[in-house]
Amino acid sequence: MDECAVEKVPVPEKSLANQAFPQINYSDSYRVILPGKSIQDVESVTRIFLTSVPSWVSRLMKVRDRLVSLVGLKTSDTAERQNLTLEKGSRIGIFRVMARTSHEVLLGEDDRHLDFRVSLLLDEVNERKYVTISTVVFFHNGLGRLYFFVIERFHKTIVSAMLKNMMRRINFEN
């Protein structure tokens, strides 16, 4: 695997995302190899990932917020993402910190149409360090299925773009 390549993988069995819901209606997972001397703690990786949002994604989120507010769904918080608090219950944009371990941060939100979780997991396989971003979704109703049918295409592109931006930043800083 190329050092900067984003690889689609199954959601890791040991991930908190796998235990997030009694039933998972959608899941995906992407991972990248962390450079040898790069940051090695989950908090730093999470901060870099969450501040690696491409400008086109920020504009897309503003459109999304305007549209979903019309049907009463939750919108994102546009708070500054530089001084992130990664303690359980704190908020970061559309995410709330749901759980945290020494090697994983589980973000997410519950709404009337669907609940979702995003895991950032640091792992080591064959002496290589990885960060894996996993998403799991539970649909409450038809609106949740319809909403995610539209969002899914964007979601995959956004996660991949954010991982690539994160890796550029990590490689630049090393």
Image (cartoon, rainbow, N blue to C red):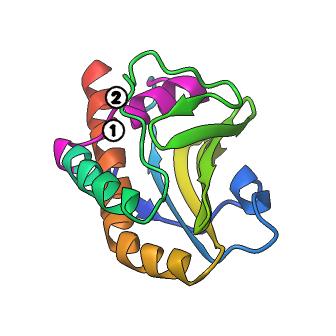
Q: Which mark is on residue 24?
A: none
Which residues fall within the magenta stretch? 38-56
Amino acid tagged 1: Met
* Residue 164 in view here: yes
State the image quarter where residue 128 is shown. Answer: top right
As displayed, is residue 87 above or below residue 108? Answer: above
For the N terminus, which image quadrant? bottom left
Assess whether mark 1 and mark 2 are in contact (beta carbons under 8 angstroms).
yes
In space, the residues marked 2 and 1 are separated at their CA atoms by: 5 Å
Seen at 62% across and 64% down, the residue is: 112
Residue 44 belongs to the span the image colors magenta: yes
As displayed, is residue 75 above or below residue 169? Answer: below
Give the percent coordinates (x, y) of residue 150. 36, 76
Q: Mark 2 points at which residue?
A: 170
Give the percent coordinates (x, y) of residue 44. 51, 23
Between 158 and 170, the one lying in front of the other is 158
Crowding around mark 2 (Cα neighbors within 10 Å: few <14, some 14 to 19, many 20+) is some
Seen at 46% across and 30% down, the residue is: 36
Q: Which mark is on residue 167?
A: 1
As displayed, is residue 90 above or below residue 121? Answer: above
Give the percent coordinates (x, y) of residue 82. 39, 19
Between 171 and 58, the one lying in front of the other is 58
- Judged left or right of residue 5, residue 46 is right
Q: Is mark 1 on a helix, strand or loop?
A: helix
For the C terminus, which image quadrant? top left
Q: What element carries label 2?
A: helix
